[in-house]
Amino acid sequence: MATVTDWIEGARPRTLPAALAPVLVGTGAAAYDSGAVWWKAALALVVSLALQVGVNYANDYSDGVRGTDDGRVGPVRLVGSGAAAPGAVKRAAFGCFGIGALAGLALAATSGWWLLAIGALAIAAAWAYTGGDAPYGYRALGEVSVFVFFGLVAVLGTTYVQLGTVNTAAVLGGIGVGALACAILVANNLRDIPTDVVAGKRTLAVVLGDARSRGLFVGLHVVALVCLVVLAVVTPWTMLGAAGVLPGAPAVRQVLRGAAGVDLVPVLRDTGLAELAYAVGITAGLLMG
């Protein structure tokens, strides 16, 4: 039987900065324009965190029952390791999706019912990443989904529910945050290339190969920095987001040096911290500007 620690590890806490970062930036963009609505920001955070944990459990379940996680390195896989029954992990995933749906319903009721369609798409995308008969995560589309839903949609949606519109800061912040969220997934899939090839899982890293995946990882960090420079036109204070370089630089260095397998686990941690520091810096800058 899985312990509480196993369930926490199965939620993959290293990925949670990818849920927190877009809500921070989206709220900062709203505050810069005409003021944040903090209770809506809190609900947006519940939605984002619930979907992130939900998709992590959903991936654990779907990859586990397919046998994709057999022999994989990295955080514990509840189903793949046999620590938890597949049905229990699946229920945990849908429980998280339900929490996110309830928080999203409250936001839609106060900001626009059309947001329900966006929420439904986000939940469907979370499940279909590795679930269902034709998971798109097995077709090299995972990074596209992460950029859209944990970058643009999460940032712009957070800003919209507070302002009733979006602004330049939200768009640029969404692109930058989305790029770093993609970098987390690239590092994860780079680590798993050997086992994914055996399992027949065609992630973008498998399709691109080791060398080009490393180049993509670096390029995504560059995109985030370019967005930061352009965002400084809105207010120079957003350059505080350069704090993301501190944890990001060691991650890039390790990837360029050819880190593989378990040596890429710290890269996942550092990239998540880079995204969080990037978002905190931008948000602080927008609040000060």
Image (cartoon, rainbow, N blue to C red):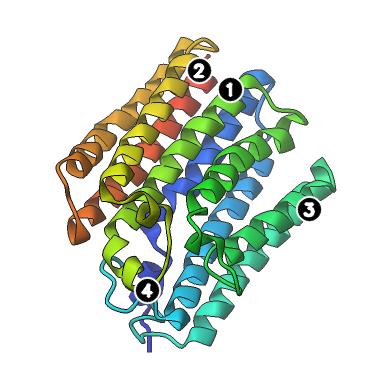
Type of residue at label 1? Ala
- Horizontal and vertical percent for residue 261? 21, 60
Q: Which mark is residue 231?
A: 2
Question: Crowdedness of circle 1 by 10 Å Cα count: few (<14), some, many (20+)?
Answer: many
Lower position in the chain sequence, tag 3 or tag 1: 3
- Mark 4: few/some/many CA within 10 Å (<14, 14-19, 20+): some
* Tag 2 and tag 1, C-beta contact below 8 Å: yes
| Residue 223 quadrant | top left
Observer-side mark, 4 or 1, equals 4
- Residues tagged 4 and 1 counted as in contact (Cβ below 8 A): no
How many angstroms separate mark 2 from mark 1 (CA)? 6 Å
Count neighbours of disc 2 (C-alpha within 10 A) and say few if under 14, some if 14 to 19, many if 20 or more. many
> Going by the image, does 243 lie left or right of 86?
left
Name the residue nearer the viewer: 33 or 154: 154
Q: Looking at the image, which residue is at 48% across and 15% down?
A: 230
- Is residue 250 something one can see in this rendering? yes
Label 1 element class? helix
Query: Is tag 4's residue or tag 1's residue first in the polypeptide sequence?
Result: 1
Label 1 sits on residue: 169
Q: Residues within 10 Å of mark 3 (few under 14, many from 20)?
A: some
x%, y% of residue 133? 60, 74
Q: CA distance from mark 3 to mark 2?
A: 30 Å
Residue type (three-letter) at the residue carrying disc 4: Ala
The residue type indicated by label 2 comes to: Leu
Q: Which mark is residue 199?
A: 4
Q: Which residue is at a point 72% across and 34% down the rendered structure image? A: 160
The Cα–Cα distance between marks 4 and 2, rounded to whole angstroms, is 42 Å
Q: Secondary structure at mark 3?
A: helix
Q: Which residue is tagged 3?
A: 116
Whichever of labels 2 and 1 marks the residue nearer the N terminus, that label is: 1
Local secondary structure at mark 4: helix
